Amino acid sequence: MTTEATTTDLRAFTEDWLEWYRAHEARLAAPHGFLSITGLHWLDDHPQRFPDAPGTWHTGGEGVVVHLDEGEELLVDGVQVRGEHHFGVLPERGGVDAVWGDAVIEIAKRGGHDIVRPRHPDAPLRTAFTGTPAYAPDPRWAVTGHYIPFDVPRPTTVGAAVEGLEHVYDAPGRIEFELDGHVLSLTAFPGAGEGRLMVLFTDATSGVTTYAANRALTIDPPAPDSTVLLDFNRAANLPCAYTDLATCPLPPTENRLPVAIEAGEKIPRERGA
């Protein structure tokens, strides 16, 4: 390969990474993205009011219920609701977004618990956001792995950013790969989109230059020969890297890698980077 071709390939690689990075940052800092969250409210069977959301909230056997006072209303699926509204029983990791003025009220279930998580565009964390530090993209951190599906998905329980909370994922398989002479393996969870995978991991940079608790890597569906691309340049922070108002999952024990992966997003400035 000529020097000119190498330079062209590196430029294209960098431009592709920049496109991914900018899109990831834009989602995070969108008017109702994760940086706009102002509260994490845990529901039980006792009615509660919150300073950043309308109504009185509780949950029980029939799911989440809100009672809106006179003059209060929410927009749910494009329909204005007043008085008492039943959101029903929510699925794990599912949720509903209700519009309240310029805010969005997220009603969700995380770790078996119903929560209300308001999102306000003028949240200080969002308005002060200046971007996430990251390593410069380098092709050496894009490695080919081999996906090994399990005979049946394995229920895998992991901890969470919130102490005492647990998440359960049905892991479809694991990915084996080599990096700097080390033979490594990562348990994979289902990703967003048909056939896509997601791995949560830590490595020797965690707590030093990258966020201590976790990073996430999204992986395209395996090729017919079961190969996958692990581009660690796209190792991304989860919301808990920026705010304590997140319930992010932690990596399973076997995904704590003994090597330093100096690629992807670093500790956010919001955590003192």
Image (tube, grey):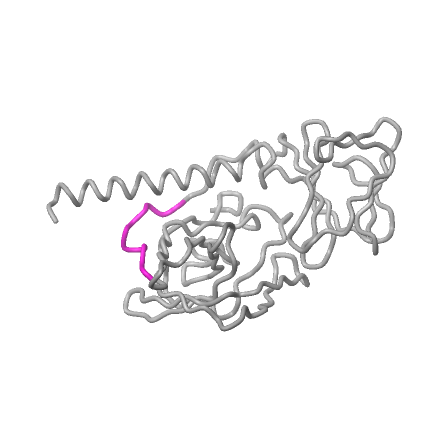
In the rendered image, the residue lying farthest to the bottom is 151
Residue 124 % position (x, y) = 61, 34
Picture layout, residue 27 above or below residue 210: above
Front residue of 245/103: it is 103
In the rendered image, the residue lying farthest to the left is 2
Residue sitting at x 57%, y 35%: 126
Front residue of 83/130: it is 83
**Image quadrant of residue 116?**
top right
Q: Is residue 35 left or right of residue 228?
A: right
Picture layout, residue 5 above or below residue 70: below
Residue sitting at x 51%, y 70%: 253
Residue 197 % position (x, y) = 47, 57
**Image quadrant of residue 9?**
top left
Q: Is residue 81 left or right of residue 102?
A: right
Q: Is residue 89 left or right of residue 67?
A: left
- Magenta run includes residue 140: yes
Front residue of 72/52: it is 72
Front residue of 250/163: it is 250
Residue 17 % position (x, y) = 35, 43
Q: How many marks?
A: 0
**Which segment is the magenta one?**
134-144
Residue sitting at x 46%, y 38%: 131
Residue 69 % position (x, y) = 88, 32
In the rendered image, the residue lying farthest to the front is 224
- Magenta run includes residue 227: no
Residue sitting at x 58%, y 63%: 169
